[in-house]
Image: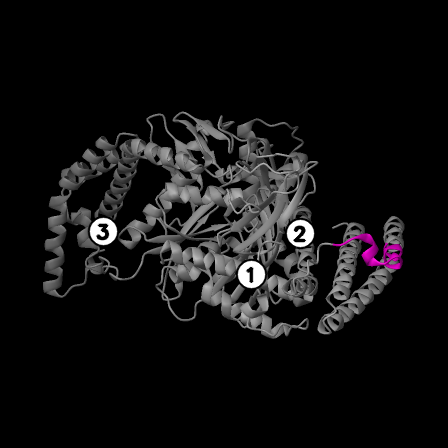
Amino acid sequence: MINSVINYFDLFEMPRTFQVDAAELESRYKQLQAAWHPDRFTGADDSKRLQALQKTSLVNDAYVTLKSPLKRAAHLLALQGVDAEEHNQAHFGADFLHRQMILREQLEALGEQEDMAGLDAMKAEVSSATNAALVEFESLYGQGQFSEAKQRYNRLQFLYKLLDEIDAVEENLLDY
Amino acid sequence: MALLSISEPGQSKPPAHAVRKRAVGIDLGTTNSLVAVANEGHAHTLCDHAGHCLVPSVVHFAQDGAVIVGDAARNRGTNDAANTISSVKRLMGRGIADIDYDLPYEIVPDPRGGMPLVRTIAGDKSPVEISAQILRELVSRAETELGGPIDGAVITVPAYFDEAQRQATKDAARLAGINVLRLLGEPTAAAVAYGLDRKKEETVIIYDLGGGTFDVSLMRLEQGVFKVLATGGDAALGGDDIDRLVGQWILEQAGIEEPLSYSRRNALAAVARDAKHTLTEAGNAEITFEHWSGTLGRQEFDGIVDAIIDRTIKACRRVLRDARMTVGEISDVVMVGGSTRTPRVRERVAEFFGSPVHTEIDPDKVVAIGAALQADVLAGNKYGDEILLLDVIPLSLGIETMGGLMEKIIPRNTTIPVARAQQFTTYKDGQTAMSLHVMQGERELVADCRSLARFELKGIPPMVAGAAVIEVMFQVDADGLMEVQAKELSTGISSSVVIKPSYGLAEKDIERMITDSFAAAASDKAARALQESRVEAQRIIEALESALAADGRQLLDESEYAALTDGMEKLARLIDSDDADAIHAAAEALNEASLVFAGRRMDSQIKTALTGHKIQEYD
């Protein structure tokens, strides 16, 4: 990437770690919004107002990034100069991809059978795999093994997407 | 006016404080609009001399070029529906293809694209121009009340309003000469009106069932920060549907076959609406329509309403799900919109959320009141416990990619302001231009989303395919309005372009409209003069009537008394004419003729005062 990465942890004056104190994140966010929101500058000149707009846009983006474990992981990798989005199939490991394929077929079947209990069980399974990958990411990143950490991140992308898909199937069945 | 000055001594208002900014809140509604003003943390809506606070969102274009807004315009609708524009809010930021329902007036496509135009006797009018007329009426009401030009306004928009609709609203405000402090979500305004922002931690549902629209919003309030977490609803569901279902029930009972003529349908809707209003308090409503009479009981009515409520509850479920929350986590439910007066609605909503609902503030006024409170803060009149209102975009913003797919760049419910960039590349060797299509919507296919703008980025240096890097930056401000900027990054020579969506008006359109409005100012002025002379005439008649009733017989002889009542009748007949000069002349003449009477009343009151009697003894 050509753009230099803005360090959101610095912006929020929080330590650059995978674990983030949710209460502290909320309170920093509110402080920054309170200081910079364009509503605070309704009477100010154009350049002040533009600055407020840009600053709050950045704060909002930072907040969303730091709040989501997946986005936070990508941001941590980016801060190490690792492009988290660049990957190839071999990188995931054959077992992982095979397992993903089976899970997707299973999801499709559960949807067709309208098996809510089966969906719940699958959701629990995928959630626990997600949590395990998050723990691994944190540990690998902490040890400076960024290439390995990136692989866990890419797996997490799969897992989060699958969780969304389970939700979508569930939603369809509930006929919302 | 001589008579008034006797009957109401010393009631002139003290002048407004010089440093205080005149800021108002405006609820620009589909059916009705309101303007409110706040002072010291209390807000009230501004009403006309007859005590009407709701201004019907109706604009009438008269043959003589006059533009009439509000109650008077709505009354014209019965005879001249084609030139009487109602529900213009539904046209704002919409294309002609979106208008798939019948309107009592004609719309035509705008040759330049964008919103359709309304064909009136005064020419083709854009929805923005028509909305500006409503805004002018509200502003003039506020200026009369506040004693001078207003400095700024907070205007509310539905939470689901997309970028094009918000832009159209802001353009209308600009056309009406209003300095917009903020476009504020209607649910946010309602929550502010109830002071929920001052509570520590709240999760609130705003349930807004109006005449023709239903909106539900889930908001999170935490220590001064207000955030809309999810919104939903139905843009074609409201009190009018209840009227329609009651109307159908009447037709079934009466054995009347559809279709009905336009005027019979209107009469049926009015009868149905009356029955609905009666059932707000009473257990039964007696109904007469044409040859048929009957009774609609509460239970049967509740059954009819349930069909509508079921659909609203479904939308509530969806919003809870979007926000990943449960009913148990909701701490307050605020009712907005006239249709929430229906007891069954309150009952079912309270039942669904398992908690009582807020109905303490008039559900028609609550949005305008909240807007006024926020306007007071933003204008800088109120310091200290300021609240910060954070909004979200209701629909995802994205760009068309190869194969007619929509690539989302900012997902819906993202807190604004927000800026996101996405990078694209060229797909052909030597490609020097790239066409970008900006979309809003949730669907995968471009064809199912709303097109906001198309623009072309030119001057990309010729390179092999995939070498050029085009960064497209979306910037959405606190009002939900967007700007898109595109840059070519790889060469360092950045070619950039800033666009505003095509549904909003181009700068030169706004300029043209402002020029036009100056040209139209003469006829507007005539219309205003007519309206003012009517109001003045009405005031004279009312004052004279009450004075005559009080002591006319004691103070005037038979012929003097008759002269005044004749003059009154003559003026009353003229009020309905369109001749401002004649009304004004007759009003002046009557005022002149009443001077003798006024003098005698003065004398009589002085005598009374001197002899220690009270005026009431002569009544």
Question: Is residue B291 shown to the viewer in this render?
Answer: no
User: Which residue is more in the foreground, B581 or B109?
Assistant: B109
Q: Which mark is residue B315?
A: 2
Q: Nearer the viewer, mark 3 or mark 2?
A: 2
- The colour scheme applied to this rendered structure is one colour
Q: Which residues are magenta?
A: A87-100
Type of secondary structure dominating the magenta stretch: helix
Check the picture and name the quadrant holding the C terminus of chain B. Answer: bottom left
Q: Residue B325: where, in percent of width, then height? A: 68, 63
Q: Which residue is mark 1?
A: A60
Q: Nearer the viewer, mark 3 or mark 1?
A: 1
Q: Residue B386's quadrant in the figure?
A: bottom left
Marks 2,1: beta carbons within 8 A: no
User: Which residue is more in the foreground, B528 or A133?
Assistant: A133
Q: Which residue is mark 3?
A: B550
- Chain of the residue that carries numbered disc 1 in the rendered image: A
* Label 2, label 1: how far apart the Cα atoms are: 28 Å
Residue B360 located within the stretch drawn in magenta? no
Q: Amino acid at mark 1?
A: Asn
Q: Let me know if marks 3 and 1 both belong to one chain.
A: no
- Chain of the residue that carries numbered disc 2 in the rendered image: B
